[in-house]
Amino acid sequence: MPDKDTTTFVNDPALGALCAWLGQIPIGQLPILNSEIPIQWDTFSVFDWGQLVSKAQIHGLAPLMYWLLSKSGKFSSIPEPARNSLRLNYSVTWIKNQKILKDLESLAKIFKQADIPLVLLKGACFVLTIYPDIGLRPMDDLDILVPASRLSEAVQIAHSLGFGDKTPTVPEAFPGLNDLLNHEVCLQKAGPSSTILEIHNSLMADKAFLYAVPMDWFWKQTEPLGGKLEAHFQFLRMLTPTAQVLYGAAHAMLEHGGKNAPLRWFYDLDRLIRSYPGGMDWDILLSQASLFEWGSALDAALSRTVTCFNTPIHKHVLSSLTGISDRNKKTVIQKQVQPATHVLEERQKLLSLKGSVRFRVLLALLFPSPAYMRWRYGLKTSWEIPAYYVIRWWGILKDGFRSLVSLFKKGSSINLV
């Protein structure tokens, strides 16, 4: 199996055309497309545009596509259904982001008064720095980072501003498991904005995951936010571009896995690198990736970014990463492909966890709490629960057998090759 996943986009004209448009790459030069697939913008049918818009929506890039088409003067020439869908996506994103940024402004002022360092992460940071319009980058929530020693105080401030504990949609399968696997406090504001706020005290759940790293280096890699709305957010800080690229790569390829990473995450990396050509310290990036053993994740993320958007990255950087091997390489490779069965998917997750946490997750899979069982199987009475434990174990056993067959076939095909 290849270390770098470029096969995802091959033979997908809609996704390939989207990459070409966002990266402003001539179609004939786009490396992810088969040369046998002819794509000409002017010949796109209503169906083709529908496919393109659908892909853009799935990957969170529809607002950006609307903006680019409008700026190029081509928006009026595309089919009306596509125009309406793109315009709606941009409008909804702009309105939602405006509400989130208003809540952020209130939080930033109170945090400054309390002298709590606040680092803006992910979508909100990108909206304010590397995108020219606040409606171009969809945000599911507002992510901020505070020192672990100030977390409880930060949560209290958020509560005073109307943010309440977000009600879990799924009951906890095992006592204390959510606290181990999560590295943030999730809150939601009551009222029309209903902004979801995630207050992080680390970038990855260091108590649970093998690939998690200490926060010391990241706290040293912060700088003033800057950007077009600096006057409104002058007290905020962000990770340096170098640290953002490293974190973005690990977040995409290790925490979520390449198979689950939307295209917009790689476009974020492209925008970071293009927006801060003088702010990227490639030597520090490579050395820190090696120290964290995130080199394989960085290699996979940057390779996909270059493949999709022709991102200008120094050749010595890519060559330094090529063939790199670290303790997380197997995890990076495995997470780029959807496992054949649910048991294999859970096995993949278990292998990413530290020993004691792995055991607790395994217990949660086999003996989940009664509350979880009632939710999972829609049970109305408690007396049904014992029977459904047996049904659950029988399902796991059958899926385990299918997993063994899948692994056997995979091993046989590798031997044949």
Image (cartoon, rainbow, N blue to C red):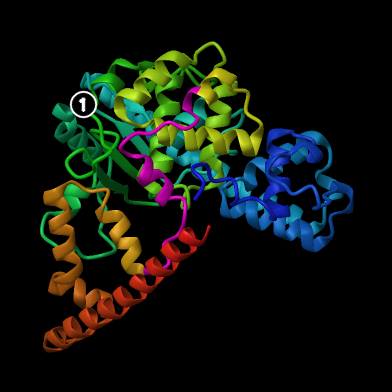
Taking the image as drawn, is residue 8 in sight?
Answer: yes
Q: Which residues are magenta?
A: 320-341
Kindly give the residue lying farthest to the front in the view shown.
Answer: 416
Along the viewing direction, whichever of 94 and 343 lies nearer the viewer: 343
| Quarter where residue 286 is shown | top left
Q: Which residue is mark 1?
A: 147
- Up/down of 290 relative to 12, above or below: above
Tell me where residue 143 appears, x and y as whole percent: 36, 37
Q: Quadrant of residue 152?
A: top left
In front: 262, or 82?
A: 262
In front of the other: 7 or 143:
7
Q: Residue at x 73, y 60 (%)?
A: 50
What element does badge 1 sit on? loop
Q: Residue furthest right?
A: 42
Question: Alpha-carbon neighbours of circle 1 within 10 Å: few (<14), some, or many (≥20)?
Answer: some
Q: Main secondary structure of the magenta part?
A: loop
Question: On screen, 388 above or below 27?
Answer: below
Query: Residue 102: horizontal and vertical position, in percent?
Result: 43, 34
- Is 330 in the magenta? yes
Q: Hey, what amino acid is under mark 1?
A: Pro
**Residue 257: percent from left, percent from top:** 42, 48
Question: Relative to 225, is 144 above or below?
Answer: below
Instruction: Identify the residue at image location x=75%, y=56%.
Output: 82
